[in-house]
Amino acid sequence: MLESISLSQYELVYNAFSFTVAVMGAATAFLFLNRGQVAPVYRTAISISGLVTLIAMYHYVRIASSWAEAFTVGNGQIATSGIGFNDAYRYVDWLLTVPLLLIELILVMKLSRSETFAKATKLGFLAALMVVLGYPGEISTDAGTRWLWWSLSMIPFLVIVYDLFFGLKQSIDSQPEGARGLVSAARWVTVVSWMFYPIVFTLPMIGLTGGGATTAVQVGYTIADIVAKAGFGVLIYMIAVRKSEAEPDFAMSSAAPLQAKPSTT
Amino acid sequence: MLESISLSQYELVYNAFSFTVAVMGAATAFLFLNRGQVAPVYRTAISISGLVTLIAMYHYVRIASSWAEAFTVGNGQIATSGIGFNDAYRYVDWLLTVPLLLIELILVMKLSRSETFAKATKLGFLAALMVVLGYPGEISTDAGTRWLWWSLSMIPFLVIVYDLFFGLKQSIDSQPEGARGLVSAARWVTVVSWMFYPIVFTLPMIGLTGGGATTAVQVGYTIADIVAKAGFGVLIYMIAVRKSEAEPDFAMSSAAPLQAKPSTT
């Protein structure tokens, strides 16, 4: 499929990758720097959000290099170099980051210790399984093989979605009022941004071919990664800030964020 | 246009890019290190100032490499290598940093939460629109096409300038007296340094041609970026330091900057 990429498609994809390196790097710096702005109980969630964007930044540096190496560009012409584009970087990235994204969400909800452990283990395992089952389909060009693995991968995906919507419903109702809307939004961002991946995966199977299909898949995954990792990380940070305001000890300390007013009693 | 670059023009541009990597890296380190010197309420503004210079440093590393790859230099001779210079790095950078620069300014003003959100959303969106509308003109060599997109891009630009001058007037009058002059200066630095960009953009359309035009555009954008990002970031830091002195709780704590005198009551 790389043979049919035009120079402008090549440049669009390359610039999208480079943009994502910058976004993930900036998100990482923001999350690590502002970790101290939230109450100690939420700092692990913020650290993990930053780890996700850090891991993604690393992989986008590699993905951009691999993309550039797969082509020979000169005098307004483009040809494949013979070196393949390494699609596995994305799956290696997701294998690490997708379970961490679910753990972020669970940690910021501040469930009981045993519930946190049980949910994190279950959802983390399902997320890893989902990624592993998608990979054999991704590297296949046969539509039947792609649909098979896509369907298998959708099973853990749907279990996760079900669990986020119904399993966590009760926990959301017990969130402090100021944060409930944001926690619910985080759940929605997870589900909607994750929907992108199985949809983008099917683009080559539903009629898109050649350079257009490759470009759409690469740009589509990139947009999904930005929303699901950097956007989601900032949302988790906002939830943690709001919930920290509801923590009386933290709100009174000097490290409290903007709105906190010490109410001396 | 790259064909007509002389060796000394090539070197001037390359050295300007390398200089900017150093300036942006140093500004990032300064802002991140000194974040704790300001009251907690201003730390997000300082973090974002550092993110802007960090993102710019990344792009100037890429821009310098792309510039070097676009030419073959040896034995005092210069020729184009056939690999194009990637102009898109600048636009990708601006797409991220220009909205963040406006958010810095809004955050350091410490408006109400709803006003902060409304202003940041509106100005951030307009800034991104301004950058996106400029790009089709930048990659065109046709003067008519360049003027068309330049004009379209100027519409959000003028709305932002109007909003900075009139929409924020009231907020500036409510700043603490010691910081009012600096906040007003930050507004001016934004408008004046941003003026550079549309002026530099028009250089190839008003008679400058060949290597001279390319050199003037690249060096011009570079100077504008240094003023608008690193210079502006330091100004935001100075404002935050001044305003922190007016925060009674912070000024009395040990983390206060030099001038703070605890007034025991």
Image: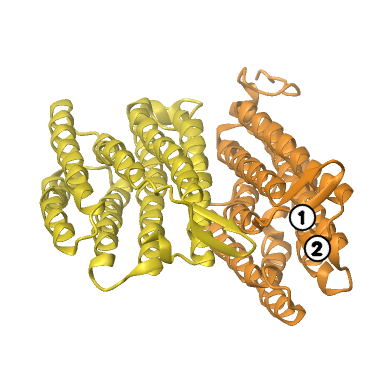
Chain colours: A yellow, B orange
At label 1, the amino acid type is Tyr
Q: Which residue is mark 2?
A: B200
Which residue is more in the foreground, B40 or A26?
Answer: A26
Residue at the image point whose x is 71% and y is 74% from the top: B150
Tell me which corner region of the image, top left, top right, bottom left or bottom right, holds residue A43: top left
Q: CA distance from mark 2 to mark 1?
A: 7 Å
Q: Residue at 66% across / 49% down in the picture?
A: B66
Q: Quadrant of residue A106?
A: top left
Number of residues whose C-alpha sits closer than 10 Å to that of mark 1, classed few (under 14), some (14–19) or many (20 or more): some
* Numbered label attached to residue B113: none
Q: Where's residue A5, x and y in %? A: 45, 64
Amino acid type for the residue under numbered disc 2: Val
Q: How many marks?
A: 2
User: What residue is at 80 percent from the left and 47 percent from the top?
Assistant: B181
Relative to A82, say whether A102 is above or below.
Answer: above
Residue B22 placement, left or right of B109? right
Expressed as whole percent of the image width and height from the top left, the position of residue B211 reads 85, 60
**Residue A116 image position (x, y, % from top left):** 18, 31
Q: Which residue is mark 1?
A: B221
State if disc 1 and disc 2 touch (CB < 8 Å).
yes
Q: Is residue A216 left or right of residue B72?
A: left
Q: Earlier in the sequence, mark 2 or mark 1?
A: 2
Residue A86 sits in quarter: top left
| Depth order, front residue of A234/B110 | A234
A181 versus B158 height, above or below: above
Q: Is B248 drawn above or below residue B197 in the view shown?
A: above
Element at label 2: helix
